[in-house]
Amino acid sequence: MDVEAFVEQQGGALLRLAYVLTGDRHRAEDLAQTALVDVYRHWRKVSAARDPQAYARRVLVNAHLSAHRRRWTRERPAPIDERDAGTVADPADAVAEREALRSRLAALAPRARTVLVLRYWADLDDAAIAEAMGIAPATVRATAARALATLRAAEPALDEGDRS
């Protein structure tokens, strides 16, 4: 498979993962593009990897975490005024709940959010998450437990529905 076929086949999945990680369409597009540029530059290593899709996913996760580490020196996001968030009339409760969860996820540390996204959205097991992030599986489990505890503390109703 050449790099163009790989991008055509996996580009959409990487973009969706980037969107879930960032919560913003424009940042997701930038992140996916950055990851695909790195995949292109290192195509020999990517194509020789045991699982090129996992390699590309790791490139994307690393780019996401690196951008988050650097961003604090360049950008300072303005806090969202919660009074303004309620002024938009949205008849769909599900959309409002999804946005509330997205907001709580955005408040988590980048590593914690990445672990939860890879576990619950990308449906990866602890070993695959550990490989994608370059950390130990035990660190994945501990990070997930702390992140879920933080989310449960922010919204007690989550505690009732997530007893697995």
Image (cartoon, rainbow, N blue to C red):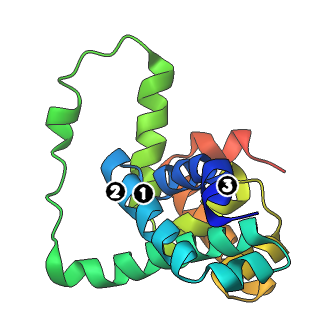
Mark closer to the chain start, 3 or 1: 3
Residue position marked by numbered label 3 in the rendering: 5
Whether residue 141 is visible? no
Query: Tag 3, which secondary structure?
Result: helix
Query: Tag 2, which secondary structure?
Result: helix
Q: Quadrant of the N terminus?
A: bottom right
Please say if 94 is above or below 56: above
Mark closer to the chain start, 1 or 2: 1
Q: Are marks 1 and 2 in contact (CB under 8 Å)?
A: yes
Disc 2 residue type? Arg
Please say if 159 is above or below 146: above
Residue position marked by numbered label 2 in the rendering: 27
Q: Which residue does the image show at 83% across and 65% down from the upper left?
A: 125
Q: Position of residue 161 (x, y in %)?
A: 72, 39
Q: Nearer the viewer, residue 101 or 34?
A: 34
- Disc 3 to disc 1, how far (Cα)? 26 Å
Q: Nearer the viewer, residue 70 or 98?
A: 70
Query: Tag 1, which secondary structure?
Result: helix
Q: Which mark is residue 132?
A: none
Q: Position of residue 40 (x, y in %)?
A: 54, 73
Q: Which residue does the image show at 47% across and 60% down from the upper left?
A: 32
- Disc 1 to disc 2, how far (Cα)? 7 Å
Q: Which residue does the image show at 36% across and 60% down from the upper left?
A: 30
Q: Position of residue 75 (x, y in %)?
A: 16, 72
Residue position marked by numbered label 1 in the rendering: 22
Neighbour tally class for label 3: few under 14, some 14-19, many 20 plus, Cα within 10 Å = few
Question: Horizontal placement of 34 versus 141: left or right?
Answer: left
Please say if 146 is above or below 155: below
Foreground disc of the pair 3, 2: 3
